[in-house]
Image (cartoon, rainbow, N blue to C red):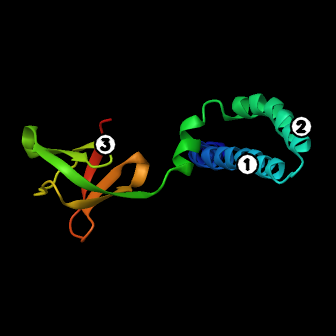
Amino acid sequence: MRHTISKIFSLALPLAFPLTLSFCVSASADTLQSQLHTCAQFSDDSKRLACYDKLTGNLQQHAEQQFGQEQRAAIEEAPDIITAIITQAEEGAHGKYTFRLDNGQIWRQVGSGRVIWKGGEQVEVERGAFGSFLMRKTRGGRSVRVKRLN
């Protein structure tokens, strides 16, 4: 019995901790954002400045609360999908391509799968599971797993 309970906790704890942590991070980010919005509402310059001055003291505390979670906050603010045009597609080793996009980003194919894409084609890069990314033509069709190089 004791072994079973221990096993249940060892399996459940890794799942519960990230959920609790993500709630705390998003709650503190919302608080800072709402405070900035409140300060912006003051029409009197001196009151608005005093409000912002008070917040600067809170920024250090906020930065300390975010310590180690900066990447998670950036991901939460990032879009789930972008659209761009391939300016150059180069075939590399093992038939995997490197794509240069019109927005300056460079992506390399990491997933298996055959793609025949060339410059001038419009693609979507979408966030996948576990930090991965998928690229596909905007007209539809097969997607390929990619990794950003720059």
Tell me residue 95's x, y (percent): 8, 45
In the image, taking residue 7 as reference, residue 98 lies left or right, namely left
Residue in the foreground of this view, choosing between 78 and 131: 78
Q: Which residue is mark 1?
A: 33
Q: Which amino acid type corresponds to the residue marked 2 in the rendered image?
A: Ala
- At x 73% / y 50%, what residue is drawn? 30
Residue in the foreground of this view, choosing between 57 and 30: 57
Q: Mark 2–mark 3 contact, CB under 8 Å?
A: no
Q: Which amino acid type corresponds to the residue marked 3 in the rendered image?
A: Gly
Q: Which residue is mark 3?
A: 104
Q: Which amino acid type corresponds to the residue marked 1 in the rendered image?
A: Gln
Q: Which residue is mark 2?
A: 50
Q: Earlier in the sequence, mark 1 or mark 2?
A: 1
- Asked which secondary structure carries label 1, the reply is helix
In the image, taking residue 125 as reference, residue 144 lies left or right, namely left
Quadrant housing the C terminus: top left
